[in-house]
Image (cartoon, helix red, strand yellow):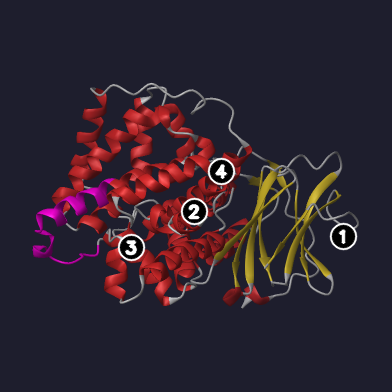
Amino acid sequence: MAETVDIHALAGAYALDAVDDLERAAFDRHLRECGACTVEVAELRETASWLTHAVAAPPPPRLRDAVLAEIGRTAQERPKRGAVGGGRSQRSRLLRWTVGAVAAAVLAVGVGVGTWTVAQNGVQQENARIDAVLAASDARLVSSEMAGGRVTLIVSPSRNAAVAVLDGLSDPGADKDYQLWMIGDTARGVGVIPGGTGRKYINGLAPSFGVTKEREGGADKPTEPLVGQIKL
Amino acid sequence: MSDMRPEYEELPTQRLVAVPTPQRRVDADELLSRVARGDERAFAELYDLLSPRVYGLIRRVLRDPAQSEEVAQEVMVEVWRNAGRFDGTRGSATAWVFTIAHRRAVDRVRAEQASNDRAQRVAASSVDTPYDDVVEAATARIEQQQVRRCLDGLTDLQREAITLAYYNGNSYREVADLLGAALPTIKTRMRDGLIRMRDCLGVAF
């Protein structure tokens, strides 16, 4: 139907609030009948909201006081059924793992590391290297779900280095650790992380990064199938 | 440089003997669900987390600091009032908040255009004040770089169409006029530009 095609083309403008009131109303009607469009618009709005990162500016402190005072005397609307509070759907769980959430989690895991007791020197050096990768002007994030958790790489081609962050992967099992690999023609072991959470500086990049469960302490080459892989 | 030393033979000697729970930062979704239950302290945290981006966005669209403050207040109070209506299956809490903020800012701009005094106002002032917190600064830096990198990956027309609409509050008709392009082209560029950015940022359901 010509009208449907035409209205659907508005998805981007709609997500950017670049439509007039009539078009918005028409598109809202369209959304009620089009599940795929609802998902698309949600994704495009999510995308647009990223643009706020580039214009963040601290508001004057008096705004905080004014807002907190006002909410103290403002009643809340009743929740609609099925809104917040119930179980979170798979979709929203995935959504929360947008890159922003990942970046926050990565750095939060990083903060924790400072408090860990490590059985060997060199932690400070490792942390300094990690900081250098995070600060690199070409640092970018790539991320993938693995083993019930999330693995994120912060990759800096200019430093030929990366930081791998494992966050909440399932317990690898008794006498097993997670081992990290840089994979080109061969797989090169680049670190072992006991348990499912931790981070590792990686010197030297390859076309692909992978994780396996190996015997405690790691193996010379992967002996188990990859639990996950990230292309760089 | 010691950094360059290959680590092919690196042995897994660096073992953690105590692994605490990582200090995961509370995210906006979690805060908003507490706000929905009337938790004012969670609201204050949510305010601290999002207000620089809410205010920064509104100020970018409206330009006028006093009006921006007023609209930012309306937006944050609306977040409080309607927190229970937020549906986590349809997007993240942050996208929900910024959707409200952007819409309010655009409504204000359009209302003003109607009264035709916007042209009087001065142009943008850059207000990039650094965060005081190191972790936040690093997060913000990575996210800003990510946004810039993804914007750079767009065609000029896609990028201009999106930024004029989002940052200036222009309608797609105005954008078409400003860029001297046909209406259907601009509609299409807004959509396929956002889709390309979505894929670049890894935003997905």
At 52% from the left and 41% from the top, the residue drawn is A33
Question: What whole-number distance in Å separates the C-alpha atoms at marks 2 and 3?
Answer: 19 Å
Q: Look at the image and say whether residue B121 sits in the magenta stretch.
A: yes
Q: Answer whether labels 2 and 3 touch (C-beta < 8 Å).
A: no
At 67% from the left and 40% from the top, the residue drawn is B19
Question: What whole-number distance in Å separates the C-alpha atoms at marks 4 and 1?
Answer: 43 Å
Packing grade of label 2 (10 A; few <14, some 14-19, many >=20) is few
Question: What whole-number distance in Å separates the C-alpha atoms at marks 4 and 2?
Answer: 14 Å
Give the residue type that dot 2 points to: Thr
Give the residue type that dot 1 points to: Pro
Horizontally, is A66 left or right of A87 in the view?
Answer: left
Horizontally, is B144 left or right of B11 in the view?
Answer: left
Question: What whole-number distance in Å separates the C-alpha atoms at marks 1 and 3?
Answer: 53 Å
Packing grade of label 3 (10 A; few <14, some 14-19, many >=20) is many
Residue that badge 4 annotates: A35
Question: What whole-number distance in Å separates the C-alpha atoms at marks 3 and 4?
Answer: 24 Å
Horizontally, is A225 left or right of A134 in the view?
Answer: right
Q: Earlier in the sequence, mark 4 or mark 1?
A: 4
- Which of the two residues, B24 or A207, is positioned nearer the viewer here? A207
Residue that badge 3 annotates: B172
Q: Is residue B164 above or below residue A66?
A: below
User: Callout 2: helix, strand or loop?
Assistant: helix
Where does the magenta region start and end? B104-126
Residue that badge 1 annotates: A222
User: Callout 3: helix, strand or loop?
Assistant: helix
Residue that badge 2 annotates: A4
User: Which quadrant of the rendered structure holds the C terminus of chain A?
Assistant: bottom right
**Mark 4 or 1: the one toward you:** 4
